[in-house]
Image: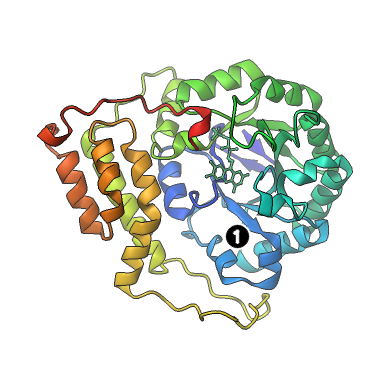
Amino acid sequence: MQLGRLKLPNRYFLAPLAGVSDWPFRLLCREMGAAIAHTEMISSHGLVHGGDQTLSYLERPVDERPFAIQVFGHDADVLAAGARVAVEQYGPIDAVDINMGCPVRKVCCHGAGAAMLKDPSVVEEAVRKVVDAVQPLPVTVKLRAGWDEEHRNAPEAARACEHGGAVAVGLHPRTRAQMYRGRADWDLIRRTKEAVKISVWGSGDLFTAEAARRMLRETGADAARIARGACGYPWIFRELLALERGETPPEVTLHEWRETILRHVDLAVADKKGLYRLTRPVDAPQPRPSRGHPRHALSDDEAERAAVRELRKHLLWYTRGRRGGLAFRRIAPELHTVSDVRRALDRFFPEDGSVPPEVRDEPVSSRELTADDA
Ligand SMILES: Cc1cc2nc3c(=O)[nH]c(=O)nc-3n(C[C@H](O)[C@H](O)[C@H](O)COP(=O)(O)O)c2cc1C
């Protein structure tokens, strides 16, 4: 599997996920076999103006390679300049993805994200400028089906990306108007693949390894970008690789499941303590003097609490579909520290595999999400 000149070990990628695909989660997914895992979307404007929050999205262990970022913005020149700041000041960076799929109003109202799809000439210009700015790095583009039902122009947008110099497009085949509702239209992935010579990475409703492989078979896509299917279940990548080899995927044991959750918590705490904090080179864009509260380094205590607070969504995803998950969900707002999490795991999912009386009557639902569960 090629990404420009990069050789990737397989065709299963972690999709960019705002608020989710930070380095701890990317690390867990990579360890399970994801060939590449993009950062969440990073504001090109923030990169050009040296924002602290923006910089935090670039933090990662030095051995996260390939390291791939995703940028967004409404202006082709700012997109290119932002990508260049990241590559020149905060490298090594191996690949750049441009977000043309984000449906949220505060992004689209400025003409960024999925709003770019309204005009394929804007798409082509933005891609060309970013390609020029970061060459020789491979540039890819994340697309949606189109703006709305009347404008399902992903194949045309993909051609514009190809003309602009992108080496691949990722397609989430829902329109901006759909947000995350309804079913992803995998047939549009097939038609987009037929419309271009560059690689097409499919996504949309890949909630299980079987679904991702079915999407690849039915569409001819070159790779599968797993998004919600990896949330709370990084093992999906291990399953995908096992199926690829014709093997039965190994079970996720209770011990492994608990250890992974606790490791995720520890990594998140290390992140909040600033383990991989980046220092701004003197010639990099500097932040404007802050008008609000100055940012301060967190104490160990604050870091732990911030990490557990932000990790709550992951904890709910991990426990989804397991007996004990409903009870866990009920007490989740009371989790503040690493030992709170450990105690909650011991209470509802004890290491010895026994089922505590308080969760005995809980129904066990399937892990599979519906499209509207995001
Ligand atoms: C919480 C969340 C955050 C997301 N953030 C991004 C993002 O930063 N950049 C992006 O290109 N797509 C983003 N997406 C879209 C996903 O990458 C993916 O295309 C989409 O969820 C469809 O795949 P799925 O149905 O398998 O989840 C996000 C999706 C979710 C649910």
Quarter-of-image position of residue 307: bottom left
* Residue 120 horizontal/vertical position (percent): 85, 40
Asked if one can make out residue 197 in the rendered structure from this viewpoint, the answer is no
Crowd tier of the residue under label 1, counting other residues whose Cα lies within 10 Å: few below 14, some 14–19, many 20 or above: some
Quadrant housing the N terminus: top right
Q: Is residue 359 above or below residue 124?
A: above
Amino acid, disc 1:
Pro
Residue drawn at (71%, 43%) of the image: 140
List x then y, in percent, for residue 372: 52, 32
Decide if residue 350 is on the left or right side of residue 14: left
**Would you name the residue on which mark 1 appears?**
92
Closer to us: 94 or 108: 108
Vertical placement of 289 versus 353: above or below? Answer: below
Residue drawn at point x = 49 percent, y = 38 percent:
34
Task: Tell me: 343 left or right of 192.
Answer: left
Where disc 1 sits, the SS reads loop
In this view, the residue in front, 296 or 373, is 373
- Where residue 365 sits: x, y (%)? 32, 25
